[in-house]
Amino acid sequence: MGNRLRLVTDSVADSIRRCQACPLNALCLDEAPSGSAPPQQPCLEQRCMHLTGGEHLFRVSDEVDQHLHIIRKGDIKLYQHGRDGGQHIIEFLGPGAWIGLESLNEDQRHAGAVALTNCEIASVPYAMLTSLLDRQPRSAEAFGQLLSGTIARHQQHAAMLRSTSAVQRVAQFLLHRLEQAQAAAQDMARATLPMSRQDIADYLGLTSSTVSRCLSALRRRGWLSMGQRAFTLPGREDVELVAAGAPLALDD
Amino acid sequence: MGNRLRLVTDSVADSIRRCQACPLNALCLDEAPSGSAPPQQPCLEQRCMHLTGGEHLFRVSDEVDQHLHIIRKGDIKLYQHGRDGGQHIIEFLGPGAWIGLESLNEDQRHAGAVALTNCEIASVPYAMLTSLLDRQPRSAEAFGQLLSGTIARHQQHAAMLRSTSAVQRVAQFLLHRLEQAQAAAQDMARATLPMSRQDIADYLGLTSSTVSRCLSALRRRGWLSMGQRAFTLPGREDVELVAAGAPLALDD
DNA sequence: CGACTTCTTGAGGATATTCAAGAATAGTGG
DNA sequence: CCACTATTCTTGAATATCCTCAAGAAGTCG
């Protein structure tokens, strides 16, 4: 582990704020009761590691370390190797997301996880999770929601991939990213795009050229405004129409 | 419910044989201990319903009935409505598969389930499952495997959809179907194809015409042999190459 | 056996990919 | 801080692929 495993020294108040926003909250109740005294040592502080962009959390075929990881800051991509050599992105994960549910009873990782930006990752041993599930009825419920949520996300991704048109897929991707950003912070009209075009292409089943073309087409119409690594959708209504299948010529 | 809910009258021996093959086995141990006396009333017998081809197990927007379903016989397709009107197939499920994990903490079904053939479905209330999980450590383990298995299947499906070529997707689909058949019964070189071409197309993100063309192309080369609703792969090696990305002209 | 649906196959057109080269960005070291 | 390199991004033209539309064949069900 070495330098990757480092104790976080944020203020307690800051940690509590984060704890309430994250889906682990229901599980946290057990360790840090919201009753009388304010929690001395927020639950998530236990084991928190930092990753710099490009660093791996784990690789394909790594042995499973019996931990679940929760993203506190930053973005992670989950990927697999395609049979044709290229890499297939399974999912882009942001703050609040859990990593490791897919390896619950596996020996080896069948996917890799890389940091896209600098990340702060909290790790919880399986054992702690199961003991919480035993003692806290609310935890089991939260866990169930987490699982059905994971399956729902995969189905949504599959729906994206089945969309025949390329612009349609890209539009759905942008909208999905924006919705996620808004779920994390209200009134957030801006979403980040920390992954490369190649990553987006591998996620949507396209080539990076086509992704570029689609983005340019949306930009040309003024429906998409892109900064360095973030974007807004001034013409969100129109983008939603495109996502729903409205035809759109790539070349103006 | 009415005629759909009917007690099964198979022989006890037959039921035990099935029980051992199905993933519920670990859960069954609790109700039907394998010790002294042979089980009088196999656990799965409790509530078993029959569906004829085309009949729905549940539809989109149905309220969740707090039951998990296990397929004992037959094939089921899980689908969603695409935004463009067409239906998107999430998954084809066969004997031994569980249905309902995706609705664990949901109010409404976000997918529909239809029988492709005549089916025999066992239903278990959530309550029974959770009580088993409390009492049987092995059950929790089996449940975890079930969940990670579900996620793994979704990832495999996503990999299919990302494959750029149509023949590639179809080849992967056939191989996957064959592997599943072989997992269920050793030395089974034949797999069934109970769904329509349109269903396959909706599953792979293609049109039924293209699916037909791909199947014909494989047949013309003698790599695929199709009967009524079943197929074999005499040229499995070649089909695997195609699945891996080897080019293949559709027209001979 | 007849009506219905599903499947196959054809030709033409739309769309994404490939290949490639130039522009923009990020990262590195003086 | 700036220049230099490497990578990523954009865009073009030509090709291959898949879709649309359609009609005939095959299969299914009464």
Image (tube, coloured by chain):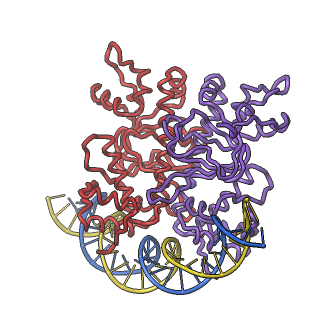
Chain colours: A red, B purple, C blue, D yellow
Q: Residue at x 60, y 60 (%)?
A: B199
As rendered, which of B5 and B247 lies closer to the eye? B5
Q: In the displayed image of the protein, which residue is found farthest to the top?
A: A36
Q: Residue at x 66, y 35 (%)?
A: B123
Residue A44: image quadrant is top left
**The N terminus of chain A: image quadrant:** top left
Residue B231 visible at all = no
Q: Residue at x 26, y 50 (%)?
A: A190
Say left or right for A92 vs B36: left
Say left or right for A57 vs B181: left
- For residue A220, above or below residue B123: below
As rendered, which of A98 and A53 lies closer to the eye? A98
- For residue A153, above or below residue A130: below
Give how far across and how far down residue A110 sits, in percent. 56, 49
Residue A248: image quadrant is bottom left
**The C terminus of chain A: image quadrant:** bottom left
As rendered, which of A8 and A190 lies closer to the eye? A190
Q: Residue at x 29, y 50 (%)?
A: A191
Give how far across and how far down residue A133 sits, in percent. 52, 25
Give how far across and how far down residue A212 sits, in percent. 34, 67
Say left or right for A38 vs B87: left
As rendered, which of C13 and C4 lies closer to the eye? C4
- For residue D2, above or below residue A115: below
Give how far across and how far down residue B23 sits, in percent. 70, 39
Residue A209 visible at all = yes
